[in-house]
Structures are given as C-alpha cells and as structure tokens.
Image (spheres, helix red, strand yellow):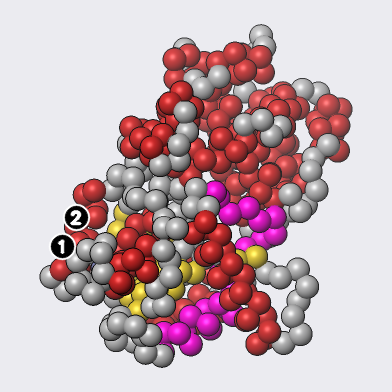
Amino acid sequence: MSIPPIAGHAAIMNRLEEAARSGRLPQSMLLHGPEGIGKQRLALWLSGLLLCERLSGCGECGSCRMAQRLEHPDLHWYFPIERPSKRPSSPAKLREALERARLEEVQRRREEPLQAAETDGPRGIYLELVQKMRERATSRPALGERTVFIVGEAETMVPQASSPAAANAFLKLLEEPPRDTFFILTSPRPGALLPTVRSRVLAIRVAPLKEEEVETFLRDEAGWPDEEAGRLARISHGSIGRAIRLRAADGSGTHERADALIAAALASRRERLQFLVTLPTARARAEFAHMLEAVEERLRDMTCLALDHPEGTFDADGARRLIGDRRLPADTLTRVADHIEEARVAARGNVNPQAIASVLLMELAGAFDGQ
Ligand SMILES: [Zn+2]
C-alpha cells in the first residue's frame, strides 16, 4: 500500500528538487498555503527525495520504496493528535500513549489516504510529542545518513496561547538542529506559529491547485464518477481535502443543518432559540466543522445571486429558498462570511461547538437585521 501521486505543484517540486540536488536545501522549511491542497503530501515527497539512496527520489531504491509506503525508519511524520480521554498516570505513559496514537494514525493514512482524520476532541502537537521528536532527533538515523521530520499543521503546537511549552521545546530543536536532520513544517495558518519558530524556517508558499488538477485527481486517483469529480472540483477552491469533505457531507444531514442555521439567523428570536436547542453536543466537533463549511458554501451561493451571477453557484435553488423575498446585499453576505471564518478557527480549538454556534447565530442575525 503506498500513498497516491501528487496532484499539480510541478513548479514548486522543480525548485525543491533543484535545491536538494545542489545541496542548497535548508534544514528547516515551512510549506504554507490553504488547507487540503497537498502540503503534507509535498513534504512526504520531499522526504523521499532526501532519503533516497541515489539522492534523486528515483522511486526504485529500497529507501524510496519504504518512504512511499510510509515505512522508512528515518522518516517521522508528526501532526496534531487527540489527547487520550483517560489521562495516563505518568508523563512517560502519556508520551507513549500519544506516540501510539500517532503511529496508528500514520497507519490509517497509509490505508485510507483520501479519508480525512475525524476526531471529536481537540487535537494538538503536545509537548509530549515534541519530546519524543527530540529523543529521535538526537539519535543516529537507523538506515541512511539523514533523518527527516515532517510536522503537519505545525501551528497546533500552540493549542493555547497561554501554553507555548510545546513550541518552545521545538524551538530548541530548530536552534541547534542535529547534523543531516531536516524539518519540514506545514501550516495553513503560518501567522499562528510562534514568531521565533517562524524566523528559523524558510517559508515556501504552496498555491491552491488548478480546478482541472483537482478534477483529474478525484476522477483518476479517487475513482469518483466524472460528474461528481467535476461538480466538487468546481467548488473546491483548489483543495482536494475540501472536495473530499464536501462529498462526505452529502447525504449526512450536514447541508440541512447548515440551512437551518442560516434560516434561524434570518428568522425571529423565538426560532433562533429553538434552533440552539437542536444543536449537536460538544463531542461532535468534526460534524460541526463540516456544517460550518456547508454554511460558508451556501453563503457564497447567496452572494453570487446577490451579484446577479447565478452561473457561479453550486445550488442556486437552495440559496433562493433561503433568501425568499428578502433583499440581502452582497456586502452584508461578505461580512457574514467573516464571522464563519472566525467560528471555524474557534472550532479547531478547545471551544465548545454549541457555544460557537450560539455566538455565530447571534452575529449572523445581527448582520442580517442591521443591513
Ligand atoms: Zn531512490
């Protein structure tokens, strides 16, 4: 079982390959750009290149094959992990539990590379994981000459601004990187990284994919029917991850809940309160994130209609149903979309989804009332 090929990104791959070949690749890098466009996939590819026995990413040597199966002992892939629900009795046990969860998730990603991780609790790259990373970084590579660490969603090293312990521990590692050790960080929100971490990595921007690249990938690699691949590529904003999440939301009631939230914001106070009662519980964080995405999509359609541009919509009839005979100007809808983005950021952290939804509903209602 190996991970699927990369979609797009040819130009950036050429640049990185050239730098690696001439030995100019820095030891610490940050790939940043929107979610779901393949930054971690790109980091895995680059790791393969760095670990290849011929230093070319030949795809044929033992190192390349192990890297493609995510089994290379000198390739360490870190990303945010959910804390165990029952707190282990000692820091060492917690470290082991998180490390076990990480390896299980790597295994899952190998088996279902096109399936997004679904966790309900808050996730983070906690101090204990960074300690594990340091332990690895200070020992010799198991196989070749080099060790590569990928740190996906690196901004989650600071799950709470008040507790920068994990990022500080990581910083020590970046300040004195062991020889022949590479760190490839990825982040959709590089501004959330500690400035001291940011200043120690070479930042490389990764652009969204072209719509055709998303469509080709969904059809040829994910095996989706033509119509579906085209339809979801069109609203993916160049993100395969987003297309996959949107598809998962089809038929799960997510769209209905998203519509109910917008309808409540447009309705009376009593209806708003009734809506709040029906919200899912605090545990259903992944589901809630999907719903916010569906709300965002719907508002985009409503904005297209307000701008008299129905051909840009995904579901014009659905948007018209919500609008009814109201007049909702595009600038109001854009303002509303900013609140959704804030809610999405809050939902990734430790904030209760019900609380976020209540605040969001009131904000939307305020914006709609005030226009
Ligand atoms: Zn090779």
> Label 1 neighbourhood size at 10 Å, few (<14), some (14-19), many (20+)?
few
Cα separation between marks 2 and 1: 6 Å
Structural crowding at the residue carrying mark 2, measured as other residues with C-alpha within 10 Å and reported as few (<14), some (14–19) or many (≥20): few
Question: Mark 2 — residue?
Answer: 14
Nearer to us in this view, 171 or 108: 108
Magenta run includes residue 188 = no
SS under mark 1: helix
Q: Report the quarter where the N terminus lies.
A: bottom left
The residue under label 1 is which amino acid type?
Answer: Glu
Drawn side of residue 243 relative to residue 61, left or right: right
Which of the 4 image quarters holds residue 250? Answer: top right
Towards the viewer: 349 or 365: 349
The single residue placed furthest to the bottom in the displayed view is 139
Question: What residue appears at the point 79 percent right and 40 percent down from the top-left corner?
Answer: 279
Does residue 40 sit above or below 308 in this rendering? below
Mark 2–mark 1 CB contact (< 8 Å) = yes
The C terminus lies in which quarter of the figure? Answer: top right
Query: What element does badge 2 sit on?
Result: helix
Position above or below: 304 against 252? above
Provide the residue span drawn in magenta: 115-138
Q: Check the image and report above or below for 182 versus 44.
A: below
Spot the residue most to the left.
Answer: 22
Q: Amino acid at mark 2?
A: Asn
Q: Which residue is mark 1?
A: 18
The picture places residue 199, in percent across and down from the top left corner, at: 35, 71
Farthest residue to the top: give it. 325
Q: Would residue 369 be found to the left or right of residue 40 on screen?
A: right
Instruction: Please provide percent x and percent y for residue 313.
Output: 49, 20
